[in-house]
Structures are given as structure tokens and as C-alpha cells.
């Protein structure tokens, strides 16, 4: 199993980024996928999940700003992040069950 994130970077408050996670080594279409993040000095926390059933859920602090989506033909899950805030600064990780990607840094700063 391999999960490879991309799309992180430095963005100003109010800006947008789209993260991608390319998955391989398992049947992506029946997998529940998630995005988590870890800010400096804090624990890893759920951001959003996209279940194989089509159901999505979001952490309260990103609801309405972030959108998780997936393309089963490309074995990729995305996280569209809008109206970014400095408190969104963290390493963002892609997750599937016990498997994690290496993370991608998102920094929101002016």
C-alpha cells in the first residue's frame, strides 16, 4: 500500500489549496479514505473522510471551507481547502485504515 500526498505549500490567509493523494496497492474504489492533519505541538486530528459508500464527513472547524472528493478511476482522493486560516497550518496526511502517507506541509501566513 502506498499513499502519496502532494499540493501543499505556502498560502496567504483567505487563499486556497488543493491537496491530492495518489493511492496504490489496494482496491481504491472500496476503501474509506481520509485526510488528517497535525499542527506543531499538537496531536493528529481528523479533517475529512470519504467513505466508499459515498458518505463524507468533516471536522467542525473545516466544514463549509474544505471539500473532500475522490476519483476512483485515478485512485486519487483530493482535499480542496478554501478560506484558509493561519490555524489551518499543519502537515496534512492521507489515510486509509492503518496506512498513512508521508504528509504534505500546508502553511497559511501573510
Image (spheres, grey):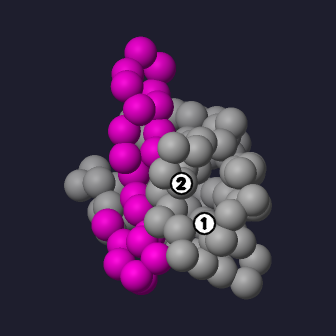
**Residue 28 falls in image quadrant:** bottom right
Residue appearing at x 32%, y 61% in the figure: 58
Residue 48 painted magenta: yes
> Image point 76% across, 61% down: which residue?
24
Farthest residue to the top: give it.
41
Above-or-below relation of 17 to 93: below
Span colored in magenta: 35-57
- Residue 73 location, x and y as percent? 73, 84
Mark 2 or 1: the one toward you:
2
Which x, y percent locates residue 96? 54, 54
Task: Depth check: give the residue in front, 104 or 64.
Answer: 104
Q: Dividing the image into 4 quarters, which one contains the C terminus?
A: top right
**In this rendering, does residue 71 appear at all?**
yes
**Left or right of residue 10: residue 52:** left
Residue drawn at point x = 35 percent, y = 78 percent: 55
Q: Is residue 11 above or below residue 79?
A: above
The residue under label 2 is 96
Of the image marks 2 and 1, the number of the one nearer the N terminus: 1
Please identify the residue farthest to the front as the structure is shown.
26
**How far apart are labels 2 and 1 at the CA level?**
13 Å
Please determine whether, in this image, residue 101 is positioned above or below residue 24: above
Crowd tier of the residue under label 1, counting other residues whose Cα lies within 10 Å: few below 14, some 14–19, many 20 or above: many
The residue beneath circle 1 is 78
Position of residue 41 relative to residue 29, above or below, is above
Amino acid at each position: 500500500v502506498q499513499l502519496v500526498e502532494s499540493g501543499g505549500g505556502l498560502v496567504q490567509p483567505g487563499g486556497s489549496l488543493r491537496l491530492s493523494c495518489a493511492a496504490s496497492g489496494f482496491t481504491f474504489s472500496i476503501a474509506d479514505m481520509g485526510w488528517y492533519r497535525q499542527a506543531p505541538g499538537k496531536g493528529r486530528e481528523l479533517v475529512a473522510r470519504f467513505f466508499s459508500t459515498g458518505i463524507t464527513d468533516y471536522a467542525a472547524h473545516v466544514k463549509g471551507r474544505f471539500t473532500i472528493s475522490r476519483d476512483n478511476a485515478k485512485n486519487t482522493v483530493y482535499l480542496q481547502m478554501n478560506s484558509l486560516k493561519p490555524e489551518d497550518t499543519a502537515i496534512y496526511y492521507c489515510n486509509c485504515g492503518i496506512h498513512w502517507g508521508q504528509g504534505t506541509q500546508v502553511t497559511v501566513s501573510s
